[in-house]
Amino acid sequence: MKRKIAILTTLWFSVLLIIVDIAVYNLFIQTATDNERDSLQTKTEVFIGNKSITDLLNESPSYFQTHLPNYDMVRLLDGHGEILKQIGNDKDLLKIEPQSVETVKSEVLKDNGKQFLMLRIPVDSSNKIVGTVEIVERLDALEENRTILISILMLVTIGAIFLSVLSSRYLSKMLIKPISTMSQTMEAVERSLQFSKLPDLPNSSDELGVMSATFNRMMQRLEDSFHRHRQFISDASHELKTPITIIESYARMLIRWGMNNPSTREEAIEAIYGEAVRMKELAHQLLDLASLDDHQQLKLEQVDLKQLCKMTVGSISGIYSREIRVFIPQDLSVVVDLMKMKQILHILLDNALKYSSEPIEIIAEKDEEDGGVVIRVKDKGIGIPDHELEQVFERFYRIDEARNRKTGGIGLGLSIAKRIVQLHNGTIHINSEENVGTEVIVYLPPTTIPGKE
């Protein structure tokens, strides 16, 4: 690829340079020829002055030499184009057909590799054309300058092409370096399964910088995904290990002594059933967490928040037989994923119900600053120690292992709730005081449904 870039760059530059050389050469020749013609015309007009054709015929050769020192041929024609006088030694030039003109005309002639400028100027008398002066002058200075110009253009072109080759190789090496580094990094990742990133480029705003930044973001996402899946497997294995061990122990006990002992058999069956239910709940929550980690798309819709909370409270109240108070304005609505929002409310209410005995409150209001919605779930339960408030959102974290085992807690609920809130671009945090109560605050920013204003 470096070779292709170098070759194509050099060829393109060479073609452009040759085009420029041709344009410069033609412009120089045209300008130099125009200057020679203007100079010859000025000298000829001085030579003619106010003289008539008859006066010019009577002038001596020295007069011609004085005013036209470099001429190769001079001819005086009458009004009909007939030659009256002809001076010159070049037989080829003398063979040129005479031509009477009414305006000044010029042309460049070539003879034996040499260039000549021929100028025809009319001679008038009493506003009547009475003759023509034809002068031919060799363009020796133009030939010399043209030879010098060609030499200079060739040297400059060869030097520029040489520099272009060097710069193209350097440029291609500089352009390909990030791509080569990326390929090497990907090969290293493939071999070692250790995620690596590209070094930051000095100019991160160009295409290579954007590509490098995109690659690094991709590597970061892959690394995060890889670690999440490893953590998921590790956490799932750890959490499943305990109930499986309990089930295995009670099953062994049932096989050995429980067949003929009703109390042992009943204890073993209840324990096995309880752990099986817990494993089922754990499997469901692990699947929920895995799907959220995979950046699941939300199905946003306009939801009446008060109606949603009442419907959620109705489904929970029947199980716990507890009072849950809802304080939400009648017309408060929010754009959310309905099923995900129900899941958040279930998780927060379930925690509040497990660790408190007083009535629970759900309060929602519109944020006055930006129009978002703030939802609060408050209980008057046992509370959470200050030093553990930041850890309660970690997966499988339990404040009290014995208490959570007793209440059936797994330690995934708040992690799931936090991830759902993050998918809605919101925030969640907890205010709590031991033996006083806990308040979970969820903030959801103003959102519109895609495709609608």
Image: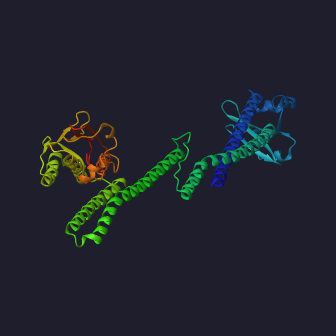
Front residue (pair 400, 75): 400
Looking at the image, residue 450 lies above or below residue 441? below
- Residue drawn at the location 85% of the way across and 31% of the way down: 65
Kindly tell me whether residue 98 is visible in this rendering: no
- Residue drawn at the location 86% of the way across and 30% of the way down: 60
**Quadrant (top left/top right/bottom left/bottom right) for the N terminus:** bottom right
Q: How far across and how far down the image is residue 161, in percent?
A: 71, 46
Residue 25 found in image quarter: top right
Residue 268 found in image quarter: bottom left
Q: How far across and how far down the image is residue 166, in percent?
A: 70, 46
User: How many marks do you count on the picture?
Assistant: 0
Q: Is residue 380 left or right of residue 82?
A: left
Q: How far across and how far down the image is residue 260, in percent?
A: 22, 73
- Residue drawn at the location 14% of the way across and 52% of the way down: 320
Front residue (pair 88, 10): 10
Looking at the image, residue 269 lies above or below residue 223? below
Kindly tell me whether residue 284 is visible in this rendering: yes
- Residue drawn at the location 52% of the way across and 43% of the way down: 206
Q: Is residue 27 left or right of residue 179?
A: right
Q: Is residue 386 left or right of residue 346?
A: right
Looking at the image, what colour scheme do you see? Answer: rainbow
Front residue (pair 107, 114): 114
Q: Is residue 181 left or right of residue 372?
A: right
Q: How far across and how far down the image is residue 189, in percent?
A: 54, 55
Front residue (pair 432, 446): 432
